[in-house]
């Protein structure tokens, strides 16, 4: 009887662990849906401030343990909603860490024709071309079976695009060389 009790205790531990994991996943899904709904409801209501985009990116790279390749300018001050821009770039980095299959992830900042381009690049498994056009759609997942393992609701990139567009910008995906993904979050200055 004692061994039966030990088995039951072990089964309960496994079940509780699974419940905790799925609860966190459900909470993340609900939070993503609420974030997207809030962004769409509030429209152009942004908390525009002046901030140093490069300093934000350096801190973000340190937080996630990814490389920061720097900026091609001395002055990196932008006007925008710092909280939303941080959320957008964080989503890009988290996606790279979760789905690329590599730790070779870098953030960089380039400037061209009055635009700031925050680049998040990985040299992982990449995204098949047939999915590239739909990657920013709500609930779109490249590999639903793998997404069940890694989590995510397929809303992160839709949120990134909405934040970029609230800033009159956009986000694009191009293949990285020799393989991987290169996301460019671009906003006008």
Image (cartoon, helix red, strand yellow):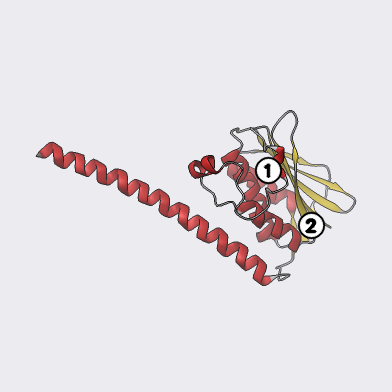
Q: Nearer the viewer, mark 1 or mark 2?
A: 1
Write down the residue under mark 1: 131
Tell me the residue at 79%/48% (across/down). 117
Measured as percent of width and height from the top left, residue 168 is found at 80, 61
State left or right for residue 124 relative to residue 188: left
Task: Using the rendered image of the protein, determine whether residue 81 is visible from the camera's viewpoint.
Answer: yes
Write down the residue under mark 2: 169
Q: Secondary structure at mark 2?
A: loop
Toward the left, the furthest residue is 1
84 and 75: which is toward the camera:
84
Dividing the image into 4 quarters, which one contains the C terminus?
A: bottom right
Tell me the residue at 15%/42% (across/down). 5
Q: Secondary structure at mark 1?
A: helix
Q: Earlier in the sequence, mark 1 or mark 2?
A: 1
Toward the right, the furthest residue is 113
The circle drawn on residue 84 is none
């Amino acid at each position: 009887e004692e061994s039966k009790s030990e088995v039951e205790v072990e089964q309960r531990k496994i079940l509780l662990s699974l419940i905790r994991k799925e609860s966190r996943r459900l909470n993340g899904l609900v939070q993503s849906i609420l974030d997207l709904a809030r962004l769409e409801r509030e429209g152009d209501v942004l908390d525009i401030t002046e901030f140093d985009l490069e300093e934000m990116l350096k801190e973000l790279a340190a937080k996630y343990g990814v490389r920061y390749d720097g900026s091609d300018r001395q002055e990196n001050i932008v006007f925008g909603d710092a909280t939303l821009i941080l959320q957008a770039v964080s989503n890009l980095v988290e996606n790279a860490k979760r789905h690329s299959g590599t730790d070779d992830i870098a953030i960089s900042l380039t400037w061209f024709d009055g635009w700031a381009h925050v680049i998040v690049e990985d040299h992982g498994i990449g995204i098949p071309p047939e999915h590239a056009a739909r990657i920013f759609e709500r609930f779109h997942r490249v590999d639903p079976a793998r997404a069940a393992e890694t989590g995510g609701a397929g809303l992160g990139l839709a949120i990134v695009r909405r934040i970029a567009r609230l800033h009159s910008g956009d986000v694009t995906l191009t293949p990285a060389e020799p393989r991987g993904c290169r996301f460019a979050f671009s906003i006008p200055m």
